[in-house]
Amino acid sequence: EMPLLEQCYNLMDFEAVARRVMKKGAWGYYSSAADDEITMRENHSAFHRIWFRPKILVDVEKVDFSTTMLGTNVDIPFYVTATALGKLGHVEGEVVLTRAAHKHNVVQMIPTLASCSFDEIVDAAAPGQVQWLQLYVNKDRAITQRIVEHAEKRGCKGLFITVDAPQLGRREKDMRSKFTDPGSNVQAGQATDNSQGAARAISSFIDPALSWADIPWFRSITKMPIVLKGVQRVEDVLKAVEMGVQGVVLSNHGGRQLDFARSGIEILAETMPVLRELGLQDKIEVYIDGGVRRATDIIKALCLGAKGVGIGRPFLYAMSAYGLDGVDRAIQLLKDEMEMNMRLIGATRVDELSPGLLDTRSLFNH
Ligand code: FNR
């Protein structure tokens, strides 16, 4: 028997339900990660190595955890990150996430490889609702230019260029299920080889030659803020600042690319002290994603200096299991957790979240 939605009390509960109710191929695509999936597990467990040093006797009657991301006001410091092939989980696909994002005033990042067309996802947004575009860069730059210009024209407020996927990682769960019918109208890729799972089949257009030298070109074709998604070392964050991009997402693609890549939260803890030391902390917005499942994870990232975090799989699972109501509840649970945990650590606004509220001694030494 399928548990009632009201019986889901946290984001992990949705995963357990989705595992039972989803088709094998769809579950394989959403849940898989690269190789031995060590990085995927590390993404989540790295948060378990950070402890709180809460303040007492702070008036926390009123708590406000709204913030801004790339200039957009949001209710809570996370965004719905880009995940391909939404129709594997729900007949309506990504527009379900669009509606939930609107209801809770959070930003949705639209994937290049969405099941719905880009225009369908933009059309599903309410007036004024902010969306960003996740970009896989095509070998044919004319196609990429058209996608970027169209996104800007349709009102997208951020361009997230995925930089951790010159080739799609080996996701063996996905390969084993030999999933060959994405059931979608994926526009940007030409399916050429279905024998290696859904991911490989739709990604052959991605340009492995993409390099830093391309960044000025992106700057020249769009006024949208540019964010590099998938940065994994402080040296590259500094390079990103130098290149004048507006943001980075410290991310390993949910563990789906390079296994043994470090977690975003660990890279953040390495990066922010260097940025502060060089006086560059206000020159770039730093985001992380991967393994964020609790409001305490969000709070830890903000204490370390992240502007916000991306969350991927939990919303896919909530959508697959319960549709819009599921995603709505998942976000509401995060908001409830956020209010409670801000109070318990003695912070009333996100600008009060600072490294001093954390004990990170075991983050690196474990
Ligand atoms: C992704 N992710 C991803 N990233 C990207 O830049 N383009 C894409 O098309 C996709 N597609 C995709 C599909 C699925 C099923 C998953 C689970 C993930 C990576 C995603 O944006 C993000 O980095 C991770 O999902 C974050 O980790 P969590 O929250 O899923 O643990």
Image: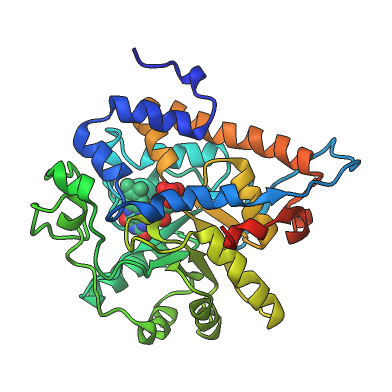
Q: Position of residue 199 (x, y in %)?
A: 22, 53
Name the colouring of the figure. Answer: rainbow
Q: Nearer the viewer, residue 124 or 28?
A: 28
Q: Position of residue 287 (x, y in %)?
A: 55, 61
Q: Position of residue 300 (x, y in %)?
A: 65, 52
Residue 281 in sight from this viewpoint? no
Horizontal side, residue 141 vs residue 237: left or right:
left
Among the 4 quarters of the image, the one containing residue 190: bottom left
Residue 167 sits above or below residue 358 on the image: below
Q: Nearer the viewer, residue 328 or 55?
A: 55
Picture quarter with the N terminus: top left
Horizontal side, residue 172 vs residue 123: left or right:
left
The residue sitting at 38% across, 46% down in the picture is 123
Horizontal side, residue 145 vs residue 349: left or right:
left
The residue sitting at 42% across, 48% down in the picture is 41
Picture quarter with the C terminus: bottom right
Among the 4 quarters of the image, the one containing residue 16: top left
Residue 89 in sight from this viewpoint? yes
Count of numbered labels shown in the rendering: 0
Q: Position of residue 44 (x, y in %)?
A: 49, 48
Give the farthest residue toward the front: 366
The residue sitting at 8% across, 57% down in the picture is 193
The residue sitting at 40% across, 64% down in the picture is 261
